[in-house]
Amino acid sequence: MISRRNFLAGAGLSRASVQRPEKRPNILILFSDDQRHDTIHALGNREIQTPRLDSLCRQGTAFTHAFIMGGTQGAVCVPSRAMLLSGQTLFHAHQAMTPGQPPRPFVMFPEYFRQQGYETCGIGKWHNGERLYARCFSGGENIFFGGMSDHDKVPVADFDPSGQYPKAKRRVAEGFSTELFSDSAIKFLKGYHGEKPFLLYVAYTAPHDPRTPPEEYAGLYPPEKMALPKNFLPEHPFDNGDLKLRDEQLASWPRTPEVIRQHIAAYYGMITHLDAQVGRVLEALEESGHADDTVVVFAGDNGLAVGQHGLLGKQNIYEHSVRVPLIIRAPALPQGKVCHSFCYLLDVFPTLCELAGLPVPDTVEGRSVAAGLKNPHARLRDTMFFAYRHFQRGLRTDRWKLARYNVAGQQTTQLFDLRNDPWETRNLAGEPGQVGRVRELTALLKDWMKNTDDPLDLGKPDWGYRPTGQ
C-alpha cells in the first residue's frame, strides 16, 4: 500500500531545508502543444529535424520518461496545463481550477514566483481562464485564451492589468502563431532591464492541428517517404470510450497508410518550424546576457497518436499520448545528460522552487526532479498512474503497463511488456501466466486512485461513475 504521505512527499529539498541562492535565477518556460515525446532528433527520431532542441539537449538534461497523468475531458491540454501550473495531481487540479467544482486551495507557479519578487510575463496559449491568468502575470503580449485556432488567424488579447480581457478588445493577430509568440518573447528579452529576476512563460499552439506548416518546412517531409509507426492500425481494436470525438474525425476510417503518412509529414513540419522559432528565442536569451543565469524548461502538454493504434488524438493512455518531451537547462548543473527515470509535468513546479531556493507551497503535490539534473541515474518515481475521463485507468512500472477500460459496462484489460514491446502491440492480459501480474498491478492502480482522490471504484461494474463526479 502506498501511504498518502510518502506518495505526496517531494523527492528534492524539504520545505524546511531550502537555502536561498545569492541571486535567484531567471526562468524561461517554452511549452509546445500536442508534441509527442519521440519527436526530437537527438533523442532517437532520425526522421525529424530539430537542431535547436538537439542543442538544448546537449546543454541540459533530457527526461525521456516524462508523463502527464491524463485528462478529465477530451481537451486534454486543459487538465495538463492545470497540473503543470498548480503542481497538483489530476483530480485535485481539475477540482481546483475548474469553475463550479468544490473549492480547493492552489497556487500556480507563475503566481507564486510573482509573489516571491519575480517579474512574470505570459505569452501565447492560456487555456485555463482569464481570472487565473490575471493571478499569474504582471505583463504579457499576444495572449490566446482559446484551445485551438488557425495558426495564421490567432485571436489574441493584449495584457490587461485589470484582468478583465473583454471580447471587444481582442483582435486577430497577423502572422503565423509560432512566429507571433516567439516575436513577443524576443521583444521581452531584448527590452528587459529590471533588477528583479524574471519568469517568462511562452506557450505555443504548435504542433496542434490544423497542421499547416510554412511551405519551406512542409517541403522537408515528403509524405511518401514517411515511415509508418510499428503500431499502425486501420482502426482501434475495441471501443475505448472516445473513438468518435473531434480529434479522431480528422481522418476517415479505416485509416490508410497514405493518409497517416500525410498527417505525420505535416506534424513533423510543424515541429521543425517550432524548433526554429525556439532557437530564435534562445538566441535572444543569449544576446540579452542572461543565458548563464536562466533556467530553461522545454516541455509539451501532451502527446498524440497520429496513426498509432488506429488513433489520431491524445484521448487515451497509450505511451504516445501520455508521454511528453521535457528538457531542463539550469545554471551550473551538468550538461548533455539523459535521465530515464519517471516524472510528471506536475513535478516542474517544485523543481523550479528548488532551483530558485524557494520553499515549495503546501498545495503542491509534485516531486522535484532536481536530483535527476545532478545525477541522471537518480530514481525519481517507481510507478506511474494514468486516467482518461471515466473510461480508462492505467498503471506502469519500468517494464509493465496495465490498462483498464470500462465503456457502458463493457470492461477490457490490456497488459504490455514494454521492455520487449515498447510499441504496445501485444496484449498479454489474457495469458494464464499473467493472472498474478494483472492482480498485482491492479492493486497498485487502486492505491494510486485512492491517493489521488479518483472518484471511480474499479470494484463496481460501472466503476461507480456518476456524471457529477468528474
Image (spheres, helix red, strand yellow):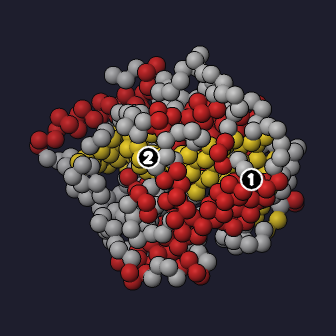
**Residue 16: which numbered mark, if any?**
none
Q: Secondary structure at mark 1?
A: helix
Residue at image mark 1: 288
Report, in whole angstroms, how far the alpha carbon at label 2 lies from the one at label 1.
Answer: 26 Å
For the residue pair 243 and 213, the one nearer the viewer reads as: 213
Disc 1 residue type (three-letter): Ser
* Residue 367 is at least partly visible in this image: yes
For the residue pair 134 and 96, the one nearer the viewer reads as: 134
Residue at image mark 2: 337
Q: Locate the N terminus and report the quarter of the image it occupies.
A: top left
Disc 2 residue type (three-letter): Lys
Tell me the residue at 83%/42% (across/down): 194
| Horizontal arrangement in the rendering, residue 67 relative to residue 118 (left or right) | left
Q: Secondary structure at mark 2?
A: strand
Residue 384 sits above or below residue 48 on the image: above
Residue 106 spot, x, y in % from top left? 65, 30
Residue 435 spot, x, y in % from top left? 16, 38
For the residue pair 18 and 132, the one nearer the viewer reads as: 18
Residue 128 sits above or below residue 49 on the image: above
